[in-house]
Amino acid sequence: MKKVLIIFGVLSLLIFIRPVLGLNTAKNTSTTQSVEQIDTAENESFFDKAFGGINQFYNYTGFANATSGHLIMIVIGLIFIYLGIKYDYEPLLLIPIGAGVIIGNIPFVAGNMTGIYEEGSVLNFLYFGVVKGIYPPLIFLGIGAMTDFSSLIANPKLMLLGAAAQIGVFGTFLGALYLGFHLPEAGAIGIIGGADGPTAIFLSSKLANGVNLLPDGTTVKNLIGPIAIAAYSYMALVPVIQPPLMRLLISKKERKIRMKPPRAVSQKEKMIFPIAALILTTFISPSALPLLGMLFFGNLLKESGRTERLAETARTKMIDIVTILLGVTVGASTQADIFITKDSLLIFGLGAISFVIATMGGLLFAKLMNLFLKGDNKINPLIGAAGVSAVPDSARVVHAEALKSDPHNYLLMHAMAPNVAGVIGSAIAAGILLSFLT
């Protein structure tokens, strides 16, 4: 123990004596300065790294990457959701689309497989069903499984009203050509006049998908997002757009016309109709086979009486799932840098005009038909507005407008005939355009 104390005392003495003797003074001063410099450098490095990390984190947030376009689109998404909830305007469509618009316009850093147009991202995989036209036929399958064609079978002449309303499709097609769109792009824009969202998506995925090449070697524009949003927007605004046109073109006396009740349709007729209609319509327009084939197949499941489980699945669970995926991905495809363009504004303008033309075409053709019909065979011209394929909203609007003129004039079942004919007509029109423009 004594030896340890002696050694410790000697070392302590040397430590204190060396500075007094001037040994290694310069070296000690240099060492002290070096230690101070190292401490200062370490402090500066720590703060630099801390602020650098915070700055890097901020650069990855949406706040650093947001643009006015993103904010505009987010507001549009909120408006869609508001219209769906507050006014019940097609909530099953507008709410998923509105949510998708918000999702698609949250600012992100490119390259992290986040955006819907970045290959490998989750949204891109879900969007595959839109780009390849997979979702629309599945929607048509569900529509067929929930549609009753009895009113159309009972009064086949009303199918002409569904055909007359398609004037909006070809009118818009010509308008798009006049505004400088190429033929395939104009064809895809034209189908907005049919007021059928799935058909519009199907046709635009084939003609205006940003992939196909034009004869001059350039690539067609990707217009799927603007066309789909325009089509669904005007479908949702049927209760706003159509009533003023009805009052403008149809007199009060004509609005009070009561139609005789449709005849009873047998179950055998209901079963034969989807098979016969499938063969006839697809022979006329083979390119519309994915849509019309699924529509009438779904209806056959419903009417056969042997496949109720399949029909129930098609018109409930399956169509609900596909509607969610379709709505969200179509909404998310409206990224501000792609969606906010001059072309989008032109498409929305053409869509509004085409919907007005389609409604007017149905109404005026119904008035024309009455010139050749006698007595109780006359039709109420209001049902011509249901020729657009916004099922069943346009039929409901017709019914509500008729009740305002005559509280006992029930037109819902009569209006469903041109309404479902409009679905068939818009699909045939899409097939015709697809045949000529590909």
Image: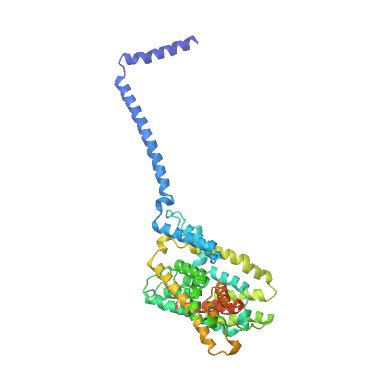
Q: Hey, which residue is sitting farthest right in the picture?
A: 306
Taking the spot 53% from the left edge, 62% from the top edge, the residue there is 86
Q: Nearer the viewer, residue 152 or 41?
A: 152
Q: Nearer the viewer, residue 41 or 89?
A: 89
**Is residue 92 at all visible to an observer of this figure?**
yes
Which image quarter: residue 400? bottom right
Q: Percent x, y for residue 401?
A: 55, 75
Which image quarter: residue 151? bottom right
Q: Is residue 398 above or below residue 64?
A: below
**Applied colour scheme:** rainbow
Which image quarter: residue 44? top left
Q: Nearer the viewer, residue 438 or 242?
A: 242
Taking the spot 51% from the left edge, 71% from the top edge, the residue there is 238
Q: Percent x, y for residue 289?
A: 55, 77
- The quadrant of the image that shows the C terminus is bottom left
Taking the spot 31% from the left edge, 17% from the top edge, the residue there is 23
**Is residue 328 at all visible to an observer of this figure?**
no
Q: How many marks?
A: 0
Q: Percent x, y for residue 378?
A: 57, 86
Q: Percent x, y for residue 349?
A: 42, 71
Q: Is residue 155 above or below residue 291?
A: below
Q: Hey, which residue is sitting farthest top in the picture?
A: 2
Q: Nearer the viewer, residue 258 or 30?
A: 258
Residue 124 appears left or right of 38 = right
